[in-house]
Amino acid sequence: MGKDVFMLGGKEFSSRFILGSGKYNVELIQAAVEQAGAQIITLAVRRANSGGEGNILDYIPKGVTLLPNTSGARNAQEAVRIARLSRELGCGDFVKIEIMRDSKYLLPDNAETVKATDILAKEGFVALPYMYPDLNTARDLVNAGAAAVMPLAAPIGSNKGLATKEFIQILIDEIELPIIVDAGIGRPSQACEVMEMGAAAVMANTAIATAGDIPQMASAFKKAIEAGREAYLSGLGRVREKGGEASSPLTGFLRD
């Protein structure tokens, strides 16, 4: 059996944990790389461009793929401008497209996200759109040239877990691009469940950043993601809807 990897923008990744942006500190980044094995780390372009203490680029190790995001964009035009700026800053061609008009729930604007994906993919960006899990939108993103689809599990930073589980499963079943579950994953067990469903990778930030022991939680996420992936690849056992079944004749009841 060959290496279990997935591809994004012509790059090969063996780690299926991605560190999201938002709550950043040196300990978190270190734990994500050393304990969780992260090979991709997202960052807000506005923070990479701020200089001084806010410049996260100073803390991300060499060899880690940067995934700049368009956080703060309210429409496709703003997202495209931020993505172009990230390229000029030397952050590469990868971009996570985040477009939110809603400041209360921080839910992505799917329609504007499709527009931005279409423009940026044509300009040679490896476009990774963050979206509310909707099959029609996901198909539009595929047609627009997305490299992966990144549905939310729950609102950003909520740690609420798999609120959109059934819809994510539809995307996994119907979309041939990698499905990277982003936002809302609060526990390693939830990351494991996502991987058991067949997701390509999991992005997390708040669940690790707000843990009592950041390195230990990062390690727990790594193990959970690997266990879920292994379970998916092994082929999960069937579920009986009614009654039980003896696993072998010897486990049945003895009769006189």
Image: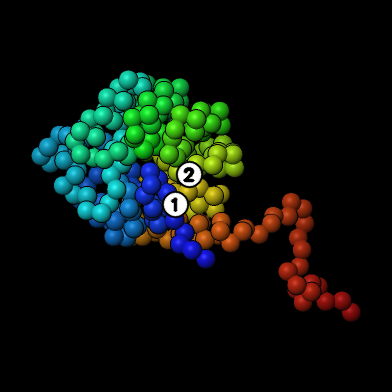
Q: Is 143 situated left or right of 12 in this image?
A: right
The tag earlier along the polypeptide, 2 or 1, is 1
Locate residue 183: give its quadrant.
top left
Residue 190 in percent (x, y) is at: 48, 49
Q: Is 228 situated left or right of 68 in this image?
A: right
Residue 44 in percent (x, y) is at: 26, 36
Residue 34 in percent (x, y) is at: 29, 60
Residue 134 in percent (x, y) is at: 54, 30
Mark 1 lies on residue: 6
Q: Is 117 situated left or right of 65 in this image?
A: right
Q: Amino acid at mark 2?
A: Pro
Mark linked to residue 213: none
Residue 122 visible, this orientation = yes
Q: Is 114 situated left or right of 25 in this image?
A: right
Distance of label 2 from label 1 (alpha carbons): 8 Å
Mark 2 lies on residue: 178
Locate residue 45: give its quadrant.
top left
At x 31%, y 25%, the residue is 80
Mark 2 residue element? loop
Residue 214 visible, this orientation = no
At x 27%, y 51%, the residue is 64
